[in-house]
Amino acid sequence: MSANGMEPGCPGSRRVARYLEPVELADVELLLDGAFPPLRGFLAADEVDSVRTRQRLRGGTPWPEPITLRVSDEVAAAEEIELRDVEGAPVAVLRNEAPWRDESGAYAAGPVQDVGDPSGVLRRMRPSAADVRAKLPPGPVLGVLPEQPLHHRELAQVRELAAEHDAHVLVLPRMSGPRPELLVQAVLAAEPELPGGTTIVPVPLVRRTDPKRDALLTAHVAAAYGATHLISEHPLEHAPLEVLEPPEVVRDQTDRWRPAAQVAPVDRRPDLSAERLRELLDRGEDLPGWFTTPAIAEQQRRMHPPLADRGFTVLFTGLSGAGKSTLARALRDELNRHDHRAVTLLDGDVVRRTLCEGLGFSAEDRSRNVRRIGFVAAEVARHGGAAICAPIAPYHDDRDAVRRMVAEVGGFVLVHVATPLGECERRDRKGLYRKARAGLLPDFTGVSAPYEIPGDADLVLDTSGLSQDEAVGRVVALLREQGWVGSWTSE
Ligand SMILES: Nc1ncnc2c1ncn2[C@@H]1O[C@H](COP(=O)(O)OS(=O)(=O)O)[C@@H](OP(=O)(O)O)[C@H]1O
Ligand SMILES: Nc1ncnc2c1ncn2[C@@H]1O[C@H](COP(=O)(O)OP(=O)(O)O)[C@@H](O)[C@H]1O
């Protein structure tokens, strides 16, 4: 296969392969599961236009969100597209009947068909929307599509509405985010607190940016699985089922959650705020018994381990000679002495001789270099380690890509080593500035290639006015302030 993900294929076969991003894979799975009826594939231009302008498909069926697949021009030109998951296993085939393009790029459009051998473990375990519908009892069905674990308050709301509408409960945990299987486990742990016979089926419904359209799409998915009612914070127009606002429930003096109407204001006890919950989880402290059950708490802790058990990345960025490597090494030594994590140093020279061998200093190669470093750093952080990186990383977009990769799995601190160019040039440890000024070294950062000053640095250090120990001390202080490392006194 070629580097762009296309299969050379036989002449005239017009079939290419395309790797799916996790969000795209989720849409393909929902289409295959029959969770987006009447959609059977990615939308053509006229349908997208109709959905955008009047929130309906051309045939008149209300539909909130254009389900589209952006592709390269080459893939858009193919007749059939084999859709593959990140590991390269085929998931589905798209018959590209109506490719289109707009100012944002090219899109493939047409029905998707199962390749018969679903590869994802969760997908294998997951019944189709029709299977779920067929097994539901007759009568009202209350749909719940949580993105977070259900704790006592939410569970009381579900019980309250289920009783009021005499409804069977259908919980469809939304598998989005970095560890979707953990949310499923957390929701399953709530089963004893849900009405008897509750149906729980995970769905890979990723959050859309517009909250209203997201809520409406959720309603369509819930209806596809057989819900007649849906708990939703958003009052929705043209929803395919009845939307119910979560009822107000409060904690009483005995720590039971009851409808607000039954508990006098003086007898109400406060709930745990989202910030306080995060604080307790970050510190690894117990969640109160009135807030959740021990089984749900255990799963919630797996989803959100204490900061001390999670990894982080420190990315030093700055001009050549600014002091990145020096500070990175000193920070590594400091952490090795005092912190329990394994520390990985991804320093420029070593990285360019190994992971990024063969890359030069064009904007494109620098971008590849920095993003590869970010990928490795995110893996280190994912496994609870500390990664310290020290590339020049001159472009905002690349630094931001690293931030996003790492932040999904752990902590991220961007340190701008902002030593002025004049001082870096005076140091000129490797004689590179002299060469660059003499025109012997092209594209040299700060001289003949750009350095985009970070507007989003978590810390700015100018080593011309700061000793090495002071500089490292400031990085450690920031990590400590954010809860990533504990207290120690440096000797
Ligand atoms: N044209 C050009 N521009 C900048 N730097 C150059 C160049 N050519 C070689 N070098 C040496 O390579 C080191 C920078 O590599 P990085 O991987 O950190 O750069 S980047 O993040 O990909 O921009 C950098 O090392 P540091 O001085 O440690 O920063 C230089 O020694
Ligand atoms: N406070 C300081 N922090 C870091 N480096 C300093 C400091 N003061 C002087 N230097 C010197 O500046 C140079 C920085 O080089 P280096 O760490 O390789 O920078 P970079 O990795 O950013 O190219 C080293 O020779 C180092 O000894």
Image (spheres, rainbow, N blue to C red):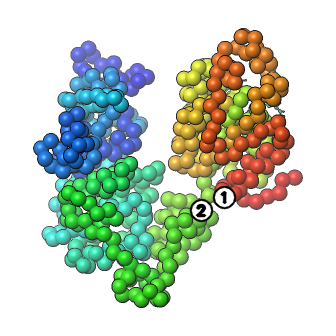
Distance from mark 1 CB to nearest ligand 2 atom below 8 Å: no
Q: Quadrant of the rendered structure where residue 406 is?
A: top right
Query: Which disc, if any, is residue 483?
Result: 1
> Taking 386 as reference, is 433 left or right?
right
340 lies above or below 88: below
Q: Nearer the viewer, residue 228 or 131?
A: 228
Q: Secondary structure at mark 1?
A: loop
Residue 187, image x, y percentages: 39, 65
Residue 218, image x, y percentages: 29, 56
> Taking 174 as reference, is 253 left or right?
right
Mark 2, residues whose alpha carbon is within 10 Å: few (<14), some, or many (≥20)? Answer: many
Q: Residue furthest right?
A: 491
Residue 411, image x, y percentages: 60, 50
Distance from mark 2 CB to nearest ligand 2 atom below 8 Å: no
Q: Quadrant of ligand 2?
A: top right
Task: Verify CB contact (< 8 Å) between mark 2 and mark 1.
Answer: yes
- Residue sitting at 82 percent across and 36 percent down? 464
> Taking 292 as reference, is 482 left or right?
right
Disc 2 residue type (three-letter): Asp
Q: Secondary structure at mark 2?
A: helix
Q: Quadrant of the rendered structure where residue 151 is?
A: bottom left
- Report the residue marked by disc 2: 282
